[in-house]
């Protein structure tokens, strides 16, 4: 019995028994009159896990799915409350088009959408870039998680971190939509305890003011042996909605700590067998401590019934202290490995703003919706590093070693970090959506002119070492046709945009000799990817179905072996099909499901090597199914199940290594009872019921540093009790 299993055996029954004792006492307190039934029904409805086919579509504002030529889904606050996720990645485990990896050498999550990475740096917050905490964001602060599949350089502007080619994620802060006072206690195996309070009120003569304050605290070991997580967050939103004016101020504080954290595993030419699911091959001195202050302020003003002005600003100040303990396996049979330690302090100071106007016009049997405005974001990155000496490690039989002696390979000032990079992305945009046939045909055209400016500084003395200032235009074309009620057909052509990369100084000729690159040090213009997509959306009333077929071409850079000039010569082409289905086909049975097929190929590769091979870490098939069933003979009880399937993945560009497909099953239950006339919701969930061991992903945005694998989490018990006043 492992240490984690031993703690689970002691901790889980005790926590579950305590919650069960509350449940056993509640029937006697429950009122049997019609008023009590209404309270139960309302509580059950508020607890329903749902996905909405629509959301905030960047410059177009909030739109229903049938009115836009893009694929968008929004996961609701009840899902977050019911599933007790530890991170945004655990929320997105519900999405059949997204899988989660980790960044290189950090605990920051990377979301793989349509086969391309979206780094945690580039997750939007209330529609703005750079405001979301960089590595991990606490889900307790969020009311909705919105996913837009596909390139979005026009919709949101270029992501400052240089990712988001395959899709984007936007987080919406909590607001006072209804009056509520909720207190929640939770438990996650092995010994992770949590508590949260959420208060929302509307006030004023007409309820024009709203205030919502929510805070939570979590700490203790999770199901991975000895891995400790703590989280302390506080968020508040004050909003005003009266007549033509709407305003909202959101402020947040987040402090996260992860100790003994298990990261990626570097491998050589063989994929090692998967360790026990709860094995921790990290070190007790590894730690990630982050502290973030962030928020937004927004204004909307209706100039008339046909025109609205809007503006939004946001800022984040963040501090990270990260000590990493990574391993690279040398012998896949014995698990013998080489460990590496590093310490990286970092500070971020980011600001972001956008403003514009939306105008709706009608006449002559046509309609126009015009959007015009601008956006800008600034990022300042201060950091340093200290890479320690290597140490012996083992994947299957981990050994604890002393922390590496400080002062190994050092860059920057570890005690007083100074700027290493500055980044500014600015743009102006214009679009017009032409409506015909009573808006049953919608034709959209738009253009965003963008400028990317970066400045880099020396780790030695902070002196400027390079700069970059380039501009590009990213157009969008979209078409929506609604031939009959409930059916929407669409197509789009849209682009992604990232800063160009710098040419290396030399390349190796294959014999260990360095050959100078002709345009060494030159920075390429911004790189544009191109997406073509067609699809359909069907609303049957009780449930929604969606189908999307897409192709994305993303340029790849390398040095031409004949001319020795660095440029964008190669391409990664991802072609795929996405099928989604959600809703309530019969009373009490709710489904969130979907299926993705993705054929990601390398084209026009360097010297023709690996031509036509599969791209690294892009599964050929993804499938998800979430089911909730309100038992008809016991309406207060809801059974929950989820299955997650991920297909085979290439581990290296040569396609000599491949990860097997894997399937994970999660089960749970939810019960609503009354304490007097107050609803009490009890939840119990088990993730990875079979305690399956598997390599979850081989996706690695920095494949030049070798192949890396991320192991899936072990069986995890979760229980919580929420009471609403």
Image (cartoon, rainbow, N blue to C red):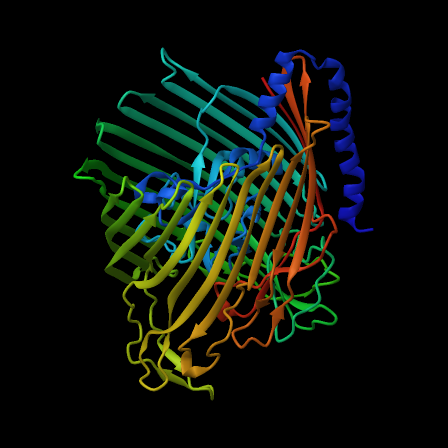
* For residue 602, side relative to residue 38 (left or right): left
Q: Is residue 84 visible?
A: no
Q: Position of residue 298 (x, y in %)?
A: 32, 32
Spot occupied by residue 560 in the image (x, y as percentages of width and height): 35, 81
Residue extending farthest to the front is 484
Where does residue 81 sit, x and y in percent of width and height? 58, 34
The C terminus - image quarter: top right
360 left or right, relative to 189 = left
Q: Give residue 25's position: percent from left, percent from top.
A: 76, 19
At 75% from the left and 47% from the top, the residue drawn is 4
Q: Is residue 407 left or right of residue 245?
A: right
Instruction: Give the residue at x 61% y 48%.
Output: 625
In this rendering, does residue 464 appear at all?
Answer: yes
Residue 484 location, quadrant: top left
Vertical order, 246 against 529 (above or below) = above
**Residue at image point 36% right, 18% down:** 208
Among all residues in the image, which is located at the extreme left? 364
Q: Nearer the viewer, residue 560 or 507?
A: 560
- Of all residues shown, which one is farthest toward the bottom? 511
Q: Is 657 left, or right, of 445 in this rendering?
A: right
- Nearer to the camera, 194 or 647: 647
User: Number of labelled discs?
Assistant: 0
């Amino acid at each position: 019995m492992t240490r984690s299993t031993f703690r689970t055996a002691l901790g889980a029954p005790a926590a579950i028994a305590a919650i069960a004792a509350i449940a056993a006492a509640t029937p006697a307190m429950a009122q049997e009159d019609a008023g009590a039934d209404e309270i139960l029904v309302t509580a059950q409805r508020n607890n329903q896990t749902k996905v909405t086919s629509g959301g905030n579509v960047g410059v177009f504002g909030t739109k229903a799915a049938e009115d836009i030529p893009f694929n968008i889904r929004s996961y609701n606050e009840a899902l977050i409350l019911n599933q007790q996720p530890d991170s945004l990645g655990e929320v997105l485990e519900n999405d059949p088009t997204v899988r989660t990896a980790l960044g290189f050498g950090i605990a920051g999550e990377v979301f793989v959408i349509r086969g391309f990475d979206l780094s945690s740096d580039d997750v939007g917050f209330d529609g703005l870039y750079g405001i979301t905490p960089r590595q991990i964001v606490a889900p307790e602060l969020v009311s909705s998680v919105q996913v837009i599949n596909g390139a979005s350089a026009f919709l949101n502007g270029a992501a400052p971190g240089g990712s988001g080619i395959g899709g984007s994620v936007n987080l919406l802060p909590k607001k006072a939509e209804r009056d509520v006072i909720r207190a929640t206690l939770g438990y996650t195996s092995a010994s992770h305890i949590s508590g949260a309070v959420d208060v929302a009120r509307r006030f004023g003569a007409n309820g024009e003011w709203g205030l919502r304050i929510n805070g939570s605290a979590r700490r203790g070991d999770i199901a991975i042996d000895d891995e400790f997580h703590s989280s302390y967050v506080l968020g508040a939103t004050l909003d005003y909605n009266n007549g033509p004016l709407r305003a909202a101020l959101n402020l947040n504080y987040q402090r996260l700590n992860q100790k003994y954290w298990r990261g990626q595993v570097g491998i050589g030419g063989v994929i090692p067998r998967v360790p026990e699911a709860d094995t921790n091959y990290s070190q007790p001195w590894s730690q990630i401590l982050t502290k973030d202050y962030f928020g937004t302020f927004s204004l909307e003003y209706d100039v008339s019934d046909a025109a609205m002005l809007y503006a939004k600003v946001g800022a984040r100040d963040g501090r990270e202290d990260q000590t990493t303990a990574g391993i690279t396996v040398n012998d896949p049979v014995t698990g013998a490995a080489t460990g590496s330690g590093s310490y990286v302090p970092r500070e971020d100071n980011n600001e972001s703003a956008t403003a514009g106007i939306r105008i709706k016009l009608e006449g002559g049997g046509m309609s126009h919706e015009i959007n015009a405005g601008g956006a800008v974001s600034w990022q300042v990155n201060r950091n340093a590093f200290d890479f320690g000496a290597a140490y012996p490690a083992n994947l299957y039989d981990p050994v604890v070693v002393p922390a590496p002696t400080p002062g190994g390979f050092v860059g920057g000032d570890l005690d007083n970090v100074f700027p290493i990079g500055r980044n500014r992305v600015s743009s102006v945009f214009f679009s017009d959506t032409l409506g015909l046939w009573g808006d049953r045909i919608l034709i959209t055209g738009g253009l965003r002119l963008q400028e990317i400016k970066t400045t880099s500084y020396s780790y030695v003395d902070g002196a400027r070492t390079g700069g970059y200032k380039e501009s590009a235009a990213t157009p969008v074309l979209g078409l929506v046709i609604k031939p009959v009620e409930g059916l929407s057909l669409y197509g789009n052509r849209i682009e992604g945009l990232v800063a160009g990369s710098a040419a290396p100084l030399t390349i190796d000729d294959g014999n260990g000799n360095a050959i100078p690159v002709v345009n060494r040090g030159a920075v390429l213009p911004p790189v544009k990817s191109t997406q073509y997509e067609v699809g359909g959306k069907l609303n049957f009333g009780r449930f929604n179905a969606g189908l999307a077929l897409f192709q994305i071409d993303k340029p790849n850079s390398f040095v031409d072996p004949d001319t020795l000039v660095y440029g964008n010569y190669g391409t990664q082409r991802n072609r795929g099909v996405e099928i989604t289905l959600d809703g309530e086909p019969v009373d009490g049975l709710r489904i969130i499901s979907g299926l993705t097929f993705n054929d990601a190929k390398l084209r026009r590769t360097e010297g023709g090597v690996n031509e036509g091979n599969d791209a690294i870490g892009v599964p050929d098939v993804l499938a998800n199914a979430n089911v909730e069933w309100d038992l008809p003979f016991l309406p207060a009880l809801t059974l929950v199940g989820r299955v997650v399937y991920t297909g085979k993945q290439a581990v290296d560009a040569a396609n000599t290594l491949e990860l097997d497909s894997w399937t994970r099953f999660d089960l749970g239950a939810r019960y609503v009872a009354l304490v007097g006339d107050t609803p009490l919701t009890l939840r119990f969930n088990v993730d990875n019921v079979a305690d399956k061991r598997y390599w979850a992903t081989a996706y690695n945005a920095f494949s030049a540093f070798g192949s890396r694998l991320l192991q899936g989490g072990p069986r995890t018990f979760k229980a919580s009790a929420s009471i609403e006043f």
